[in-house]
Every structure is written in structure tokens, then in C-alpha cells.
Amino acid sequence: MNTGLPPDLPARSGDAELAQRIAGGDAAAFERLMRLHNRRLYRLARVVLRNDGDAEDALQEAYLQAFRSLGRFRGDSSLGTWLSQLVTNECLSRLRKQARRDGIARMVQADPLDDEQPLDAETEAMDPTLAERPEDALARSQLRALIERRLDELPVAFSAVFVLRGLEELSVEETAQSLGIPEATVRSRYFRARGLLRKSLAADIDLARQGVFAFDGARCDRIVGAVLRRLHNPGPAGASSAASPPDNPPAPP
């Protein structure tokens, strides 16, 4: 992707160098940082806040915090992991503020990344490889929307891990550092999330399968009408046998 950045900025700038350039006021370096991590960080914010606009706002705020703090970046973790931590903290802070405004004490007391939240949903991401015909693009869009809805229904403890591990393909270690949880917890939550998603999509498929290759309505009328027309108007090629019984029918058994 052409980002319009100056050619003197290497495509693989090291984290420390990139942080130093941003801290020194290099706007192009900061733009590169955002473009490198935008998709992952947006997905993380979106799965925690479950609202497109709120996720964008939180991500912007996290980037501003990062810009002000990059002078203190020491490279103990990767820039991507460090940014993920900032986004996670910003999202959780927003949820707690919203909970206080709404007077929902249970949301204030319960960390959205807590395993103990009730499990009220289920689904699993598929990997569609359909051709780019209009009807296929529509089907893919509908499938993506379905998966996003099912992810929104998962407890954040599981959906956040699934997004980082399953969609962004972070390692177990990187995911654990990004969310501030043990690696063993990442493994168990990812396994649980996949199971819940798979079960949910299976339920959706069960509901939809009765409509596959639908045969009622216009299709049914069309086939019945065509058969009746052929019976009443036999064609030249053997159709007479369909319109009248054979001369020598077989003897009954």
C-alpha cells in the first residue's frame, strides 16, 4: 500500500528507531506507525467496546497517548504490543466511565476481560474463498456481518483473545503481553472462543439449511407448469409416450 511517506523512511524501521524519530517530531514516522498497526488495534478496540464509533474514538485517544509517551519507550516489548496495551487500557477506562454514568454497578465491578462473565453466545470464523461475483461478494459480506455479531455476543475475555490470536495471528506471548494476562490463559480462552463460535455458527447453519436451494414459490410453479405443458403439448421426440399409455404395457407381477 502506498502511504505517501517519504522514501528515506525504511519499510522495516526498528521499534526503537521509529520511537525516537516520532519523539523527535517526525510526523511521517508517526503516520507510518499508525498505518502499520491500525487494523489490529481497531479490531481490538472494536471487540472490547462493541461499537464502531467508540472504537475509533478510543483508538485515536490511545494514539495521542502514545505520541506523548514515545520518548519514554524503552523497548521492553514491541511497539505493537505496547500500543495494544494502551488501547486495551483506554477501552476499559471508557467502559468503566460509561458504567458509572449509567449507574450499572456490576460493570464497574467486573473487568470485561474477566473469565467469570456469563457465556451468552457462540460462533466461528470461516475462510470464504468465493469468486468475486456480485452475489458472492454479497454472501461474503453477510457472512462477515454474522461473524461480527457472534463475536460481539461473546464475553470480551474470549473475543479479545480470538481477535488477536485468530484474526491478527499474534503469538501466544504477544497476545498475553497485549492483554496483560498469562500465556496459559490465552491458550485456554482461545480454545474456548473457537468452540463457542463454532457452536454458534453451527446453530445458524442448522436454521438456514432448510432454505438451501429453495424449492417453493416461483421455482415450484415453473417446474410444475413446464411438465403440464409438455404433457398437453407433446413434442416430436418421444413425447407421445408421456401423453398416452404404451401399446403393450408390462404384465403385473
Image (cartoon, rainbow, N blue to C red):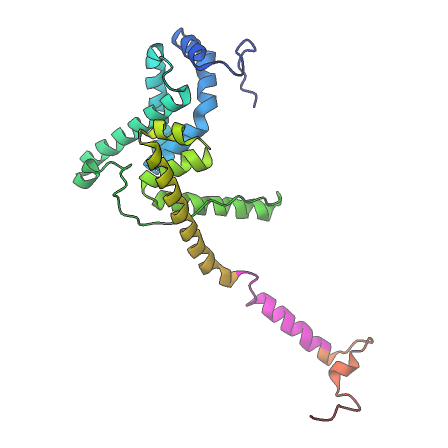
Determine the main secondary structure of the stretch shown in magenta.
Answer: helix
- Residue 229 counted in the magenta span: yes
Asked if 240 appears above or below 100 in the picture, the reply is below
- Residue 224 counted in the magenta span: yes
Quadrant holding the N terminus? top right
The residue depicted at 44 percent of the width and 52 percent of the height is 201
Which residue occupies the foreground of this view, 67 or 84? 84
Residue extending farthest right? 236
Image quarter for residue 101? Answer: top left
Q: Is residue 100 left or right of residue 238?
A: left
The residue depicted at 79 percent of the width and 82 percent of the height is 240
Residue 53 visible in the picture: no
Task: Specify start and end residues of the magenta stretch as a single range.
Answer: 212-230
Residue 218 visible in the picture: yes
Could you say where residue 203 lies in the image, as x and y percent from the top left?
42, 56
Q: Is residue 236 left or right of residue 182?
A: right
Image quarter for residue 88? Answer: top left
The residue depicted at 79 percent of the width and 91 percent of the height is 248
Q: Is residue 129 left or right of residue 226?
A: left
Asked if 16 appears above or below 179 in the picture, the reply is above
Residue extending farthest top? 24
Could you say where residue 94 lies in the image, as x and y percent from the top left?
27, 30
Which residue occupies the foreground of this view, 76 or 53? 76
Numbered label tally: 0
Could you say where residue 118 lies in the image, as x and y percent from the top left?
27, 47
Could you say where residue 5 lies in the image, as x and y percent from the top left?
53, 14
Quadrant holding the C terminus? bottom right
